[in-house]
Image: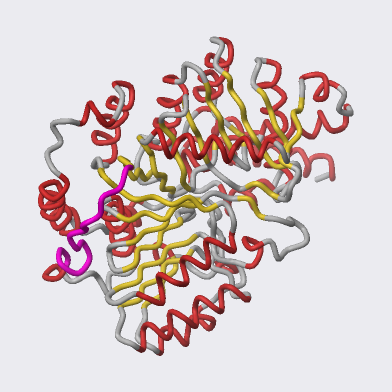
Amino acid sequence: MTWHQIIELIVTLNAILAIITVFREKRDIAATWAWLLVLTVFPVFGFIIYAFIGRQMPHKQLTRVQQQVAVALDKRLDQQRTENGSEANLADEITTGAATMVNMFMATDEAFLARKNRVKIFTNGDDLFHSLIEDIEAAQSSIHIEFYTFYADNIGTEIRDLLVKKAKEGVEVRVIYDPWGSMGTNTRFFKPLLDAGGYVERFLGTRPAFIDFRLNFRDHRKIVVIDGKEGYIGGYNIGDQYLGRKPKFGFWRDTHLRIVGSGVFALQRHFMMDWNATDRAHPFSEGELVDKYFPLIKVKGDTTMQIVSSGPDSDMQQIKMGYMRMIQQATKTLWIQTPYLIPDDSVLDSLRCAAMSGVDVRIMVPDKPDHPFVYRATQYYARQLADDGVKIYYYHNGFIHAKTMVVDGRMASVGSANLDFRSFKLNFEINSFLYDEKLAKKLEEIYQEDIDKSELITPQKFADQSLYLKFKQMFSRLLSPIL
């Protein structure tokens, strides 16, 4: 057999295996064609890529959730509603458009409406970690932490040592981390916490990163719950780079929230369900669920909100649906911050419709990459949207990692989900949807301050980019369903 025949045989077998591999699992048409492209254009090597990021999650990983968490939560919510007063006056708190969102989230994610929360916004890592450390120091009963990234660096070690101290004091400490997001962090790093009586688990019992060949279906959530009373949600992870200590990124601009009120119950619920799905050996005790983990909270805040999760364990794409509903409701302004702008066709069309309807649509993205293909794909979609009338801003004061959306200065979203395929379909995410004009106005003010540190990239500036850069953007866009 000649070399020519051998190559033909390899190409033919590769094509057949590519078709079998891609079509044997249910996935959307865009991802199907993207994977066929990868597997056929890169024979053999494409299958190595597929082994890391193409396989679907085994169904058994998605069914380890105990229902007693929901039962306990429902019991406490009934009492909390009595504490906060009747819900008969909801119309006075949220607009008609927001009410339809509330109903949608209740139907798709069982996301209850949490009223009268006190919410603080953080946009600086130093301020956030100072507050977080203070709350951990004051913990009396339980500390629940779930992060995509928990690095074994200076701030990671400082927080771990504080958790060790609290565990020795008798406080229940549980930590969930994602091994890929926390690359370099291992069980040896957490051994002092384990020895002190704390619990630490890799999400869904996944293997350490260096032997875990599955890059998809990551735990991208960022959840902290202290004593069931204070909660944190947003874009920050635990690591020195989030404090601006990495020269590659410079100042790290993100958005995070501290919540006091019944909204914390939703964060607690999601953490507990993730824990029960991850660690079946040490589940939460049913007898103490209500009083220990869902204490009655007496606080009078201004924010009505819903905590919404999404992930590959559901086909609903709840957070994406929330983003689309917000985009569709915008009548004056729609301001978005996202580090990764890789929308699917439905979101892309919604953004175009808003801009062409006269809505002031602004999208702020970083001016530097942290993932080359993702960044070039972001530039591609930014160029397309700029041509449709969307104002695209490149943030110049470091790296912007915030995932925020503000509509008409009356409702907003802050959380872990980017405006991209991965957050919509492949990652486990969690966002807060906020029905509070005062908070939305504050987020608008923060956005205006960020514009002062950004550059408006006009369609002409995009047109002036080199042909080589445009080629890299277009090529990266072809891979966008799997990035």
User: 464 left or right of 229?
Assistant: right
Depth check: 370 or 406 in front? 406
Q: Quadrant of residue 145?
A: bottom left
Q: Quadrant of residue 101?
A: top left
Quarter in which the C terminus is drawn:
top right
Q: Quadrant of residue 166?
A: bottom left
- For image coordinates 71% across by 40% down, the residue present is 395
Q: Position of residue 9 (x, y in %)?
A: 72, 41
Depth check: 342 or 37 in front? 342
Q: Position of residue 358 (x, y in %)?
A: 56, 11
Magenta-colored segment: predominant secondary structure = loop
Point out the stretch of residues depicted in magenta.
289-302
Which residue is most to the top? 357
Magenta residue check for 296: yes
Q: Position of residue 151 (x, y in %)?
A: 58, 70
Depth check: 236 or 35 in front? 236
Q: Position of residue 213 (x, y in %)?
A: 56, 60
- For image coordinates 34% across by 41% down, the residue present is 314
Quarter in which the N terminus is drawn:
top right
Q: Is residue 217 visible in the rendered structure shown here? A: no
